[in-house]
Amino acid sequence: MFASPAYAQAAGAAPPSTLQALMASPLPIMVVILAIWWVLFINPQRKAQKAQRAKIEAAKKGDTVITAGGLIGKVIKVDGDEVELELGPNVRVRALRSTLSEIRPLGAPAND
């Protein structure tokens, strides 16, 4: 009696795939970007800093060193966190080991 007319209904949209569902959220994208950033920038920088720190800790008598201030000298004495450098004839200074920026082993050529 009061029946409504039947209209053809459109098929429902297919549920999104798992990949589409993941990419709809910004969190997975940010995790991927962070992982790429870690691999390309952060990890190599940490490795380089660790190698530099080990090189400075291995400074010994006779090595030629360059300080962060640009002074070039020869290590005369190593005493804990301090090194005594000879900058020229009868010119000796004490410097903190942490201020050394480059170590050239005895007999190594200059990096010019």
Image: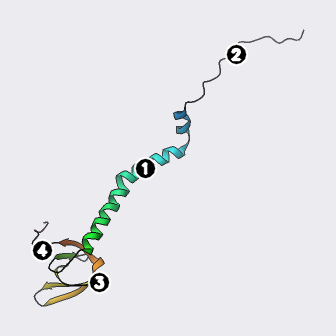
Question: Residue 22's quadrant in the figure?
Answer: top right
Check disc 2 and report its element: helix, strand or loop: loop
The residues bearing labels 4 and 3 have C-alpha atoms spaced at a distance of 20 Å
CB under 8 Å between discs 4 and 3: no
Mark carried by residue 9: 2
Density class for disc 1 (Cα within 10 Å; few <14, some 14-19, many ≥20) is: few
Does 53 sit left or right of 70 as displayed?
Answer: right
Q: Quadrant of the N terminus?
A: top right
Residue at the (49%, 48%) spot, across then down? 30
Q: Which residue is mark 1?
A: 35
Q: Quadrant of the C terminus?
A: bottom left
Mark carried by residue 80: 3
CB under 8 Å between discs 2 and 3: no
Q: Mark 1 vs mark 4: give the one in front.
A: 4
The residues bearing labels 3 and 1 have C-alpha atoms spaced at a distance of 39 Å
Q: Which residue is mark 4?
A: 106
The residues bearing labels 2 and 3 have C-alpha atoms spaced at a distance of 84 Å
Residue at the (35%, 62%) spot, across then down? 46
Question: Residue 4's quadrant in the figure?
Answer: top right
* x and y, in percent, of residue 100 in the image: 25, 76
Density class for disc 4 (Cα within 10 Å; few <14, some 14-19, many ≥20) is: few
Does 64 sit left or right of 32 as displayed?
Answer: left
Check disc 1 and report its element: helix, strand or loop: helix
* x and y, in percent, of residue 27 in the image: 53, 46
Of residues 96 and 91, the one nearer the viewer is: 96
